[in-house]
Amino acid sequence: MKVNIEIDCSPEEARRFMGLPDVEQANEIYIESISKAMKGVSNIDQLEQYAKQIAPMGQMGMKMFQNFMENAAKGAGAVPTDKPRGSSE
């Protein structure tokens, strides 16, 4: 037997229903501090050094941030690639 249940709710309602903590204020403070710091960044090397200093999860957080930045740059067409990810060539 297969049963499908659809629940129509906002992300806030889902968070409450699942009993997850509200981290909105902490996230806003974190984003604001990063935004202020990024205003002085003029190249990728500076950005990488700054990210290493503030990475909340150490090396794993840095790797996630690096992947995010690479994907954002690829989406903007700013970073040329030798071959697409997942290519078997």
Image (cartoon, grey):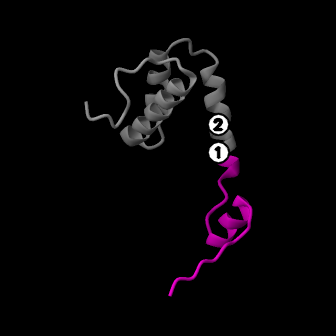
Q: Marks 1 and 2: CB-CB under 8 Å?
A: yes
Residue 58 quadrant: top left
Q: What is the number of the mark on residue 31?
A: 2
Indicate the position of residue 82 as horizontal and vertical percent values: 34, 20
Indicate the position of residue 46 as horizontal and vertical percent values: 48, 16
Q: Is residue 7 highlighted in magenta?
A: yes
Question: At label 1, which amino acid type do we have?
Answer: Asn
Residue 32 quadrant: top right
Mark 1 residue crowding within 10 angstroms, few (<14) / some (14–19) / many (20+): few
| Residue visible at 66% across and 25% down in the picture | 36
Residue in the foreground of this view, choosing between 32 and 2: 2
Indicate the position of residue 31 as horizontal and vertical percent values: 64, 36
Q: Quadrant of the C terminus?
A: top left
Magenta-tinted stretch: 1-26
Q: Describe the element under mark 1 as helix, strand or loop.
A: helix
Q: Which residue is mark 1?
A: 27
Q: Is residue 17 above or below residue 73?
A: below
Residue in the foreground of this view, choosing between 67 and 89: 89
Q: Is residue 27 left or right of residue 55?
A: right
Question: At label 2, which amino acid type do we have?
Answer: Ile
| Residue visible at 47% across and 18% down in the picture | 79
| Residue visible at 69% across and 72% down in the picture | 7
Q: Give the Cα distance between marks 1 and 2.
A: 6 Å
| Residue visible at 60% across and 78% down in the picture | 4
Q: How many marks?
A: 2
